[in-house]
Image (spheres, rainbow, N blue to C red):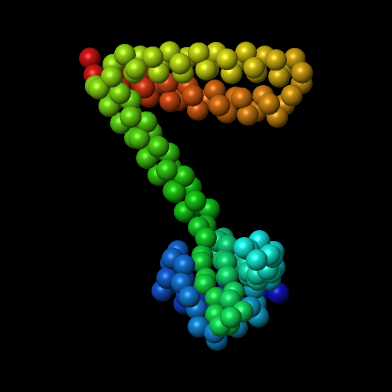
């Protein structure tokens, strides 16, 4: 059962201080968390065998809260996940950074090794063609999983190809 004090006061105060960083809590803070959060025991393989480890999870204000508990000192590390809006912002930022990296790689290749630049473009076109042929086979075999994955690869490859080709246009 959700507890208003735990959410509105306790978690809020910790989040306001640490944000998305992972931080150690005191043993008293950890005891409060273990009282209100859901326990999940995981089995980990170590060099000497297996050990059980307790983690605690909680959903708060659209974000997942994780507590990694240490039975050695009774303390734990806490981390707050991103809410849906922050996840979308991070996704957009990551996509923009990935596009920029692709453009920079293509620009360097065109400037330093133009023959390899054009060779890479041809390889991408061939790969897209191969994927499209594979999709036709998956359609015949009614393999929806294969179709979905291949369509994703085609889309990614077409995006990369268009970025590479745009570098050549800007270079002229």
Locate the C terminus by quadrant: top left
Res. 31 in view: yes
Q: As drawn, which residue projects farthest toward the front?
A: 48
- Examine the image and state in which quarter residue 60 appears: bottom right
In the picture, the quarter occupied by the N terminus is bottom right
Residue at x-position 34% and y-position 18%: 117
Residue 10: x and y in percent read 53, 79
Residue 26 against residue 79 in the figure, above or below: below
Q: Is residue 30 visible?
A: no
Residue farthest to the bottom, as pictured: 28
Asked if residue 117 lies left or right of residue 132, the reply is left
Height in image: 68 above or below 125? Answer: below
Which residue is nearer to you in this view: 99 or 45?
45
Q: Quadrant of residue 144?
A: top right
Instruction: Say whether residue 43 is left or right of residue 165.
Output: right
Q: Pinpoint residue 75: horizontal percent, then vertical percent.
A: 55, 80
Residue drawn where x is 47% and y is 54% of the image? 86
Which residue is drawn at the image coordinates 58% and 62% (left, top)? Answer: 64
Which residue is pictured at 35% across the width and 14% down the height? 118
Asked where in the image residue 171 lies, by quadrant, the reply is: top left
Residue 126 screen position, x and y as percent: 50, 13
Q: Position of residue 116 (x, y in %)?
A: 34, 17
Would you place residue 64 above or below residue 119 in this image? below
**Pick the front one: 59 or 31:** 31
């Amino acid at each position: 059962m959700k507890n208003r004090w735990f959410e509105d006061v306790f978690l809020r105060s910790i989040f306001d201080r640490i944000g998305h960083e992972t931080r150690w809590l005191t043993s008293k803070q950890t005891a409060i968390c273990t009282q209100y959060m859901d326990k999940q025991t995981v089995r980990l393989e170590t060099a000497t065998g297996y050990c059980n480890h307790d983690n605690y999870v909680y959903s708060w204000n659209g974000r997942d809260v994780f507590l990694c508990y240490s039975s050695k000192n009774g303390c734990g590390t806490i981390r707050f996940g991103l809410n849906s809006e922050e996840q979308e912002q991070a996704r957009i930022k990551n996509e923009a950074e990935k596009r920029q990296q692709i453009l920079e790689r293509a620009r360097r290749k065109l400037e330093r090794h133009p023959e390899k630049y054009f060779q890479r473009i041809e390889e991408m076109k061939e790969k897209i063609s191969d994927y499209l042929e594979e999709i036709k086979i998956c359609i015949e075999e009614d393999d929806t999983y294969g179709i979905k994955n291949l369509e994703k690869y085609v889309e990614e490859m077409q995006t990369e190809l268009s970025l590479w080709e745009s570098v050549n246009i800007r270079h002229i």
